Every structure is written in C-alpha cells, then in structure tokens.
Image: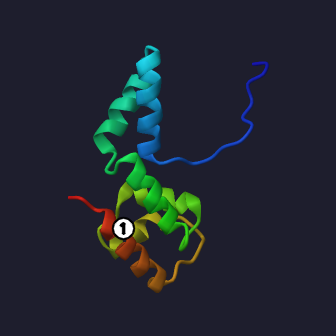
C-alpha cells in the first residue's frame, strides 16, 4: 500500500464526527461504513458541536484533551461513571478533580 501511512492522529468528539460526516454527506454519497458511522453518531451524540467544543475547553483545564473528549462523549452522571472512564488509565485523578469535572459536566447536561 504505497502512500498509505498515518501522518498524525488527533482525538475528536462524537459531535465533531457527526458534523464532518453530515458535511461530507451533502457533497458525496456515503459508503456503507460511513452510513453506519453517521447513524451511530446521530443516535449517540449528546451535545451539539458548539457545546461540545466549549465543554472540552473547560475540561482541558483539569485533564488532558483525550480525557476531556471521553468525558464529553459520555457525559457521566456520578463519580462511579466517571471513575469507569479512568479505570484502565494509569493516571491518578484526585477526587477534588473528579468533583470539579462533574460540576463542569452538569452545566452542559440537557436531559
């Protein structure tokens, strides 16, 4: 596979994937995998793009960007849910930071 190597990777939120796929769908016909992905992000995106970007920005003051994106995609409701996101990570998170994260997320919850 000549010319097929990853130059860089950057995590993005579900809301950003939704925006990208919807924009691409307006100009091109989506293939099977893209249609499945679009269907998935439409069902599971909890925030609009602007809210998602603002939430990630606020969370980045407390945790790294990749964790901020995970939290934004999941919108955990309590400490147990939040701890599940960090269960496999080797990064210790202080309980004060977890409480602060929950307070920030609560401002964006629309349920």
Q: Position of residue 55 (x, y in %)?
A: 43, 61
Q: Is residue 40 left or right of residue 96?
A: left
Residue placed most toward the observer, 75 or 84: 75
What quarter of the picture does the C terminus occupy?
Answer: bottom left
Does residue 95 sit above or below 31 in this rendering? below
Question: Residue 61, image x and y in percent?
Answer: 55, 72
Q: Is residue 5 visible?
A: yes
Q: Secondary structure at mark 1?
A: helix
* Looking at the image, residue 63 lies above or below residue 29: below
Residue at horizontal 39%, vertical 80%? Answer: 99
> Given the current orientation, which residue lies at the most extreme left position?
111
Label 1, residues with CA under 10 Å away: few <14, some 14-19, many ≥20: many
At 73% from the left and 25% from the top, the residue drawn is 4
**Residue farthest toward the bottom in the current orientation of the protein:** 96
Q: Which residue is mark 1?
A: 105
Work out which quarter of the rendered image holds the N terminus and state it.
top right
Picture quadrant of residue 64: bottom right
Place residue 105 in its image quadrant. bottom left
**Is residue 70 visible to us here?**
no
The percent position of residue 94, horizontal first and vertical second, equals 51, 83
Q: At x 53% / y 78%, what residue is drawn?
A: 93
Instruction: Look at the image and name its color scheme.
Output: rainbow
List x then y, in percent, for residue 71: 43, 61
């Amino acid at each position: 596979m000549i010319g097929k190597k990853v130059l860089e990777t950057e995590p993005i939120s579900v809301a950003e994937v939704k925006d990208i796929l919807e924009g691409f769908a307006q100009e091109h016909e989506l293939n099977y995998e893209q249609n499945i992905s679009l269907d998935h992000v439409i069902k599971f995106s909890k925030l609009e793009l602007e809210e998602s970007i603002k939430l990630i920005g606020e969370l980045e003051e407390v945790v790294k960007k990749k964790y901020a994106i995970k939290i934004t995609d999941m919108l955990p409701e309590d400490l147990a849910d939040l701890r599940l996101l960090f269960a496999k990570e080797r990064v210790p998170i202080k309980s004060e930071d977890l409480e602060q994260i929950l307070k920030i997320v609560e401002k964006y919850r629309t349920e």
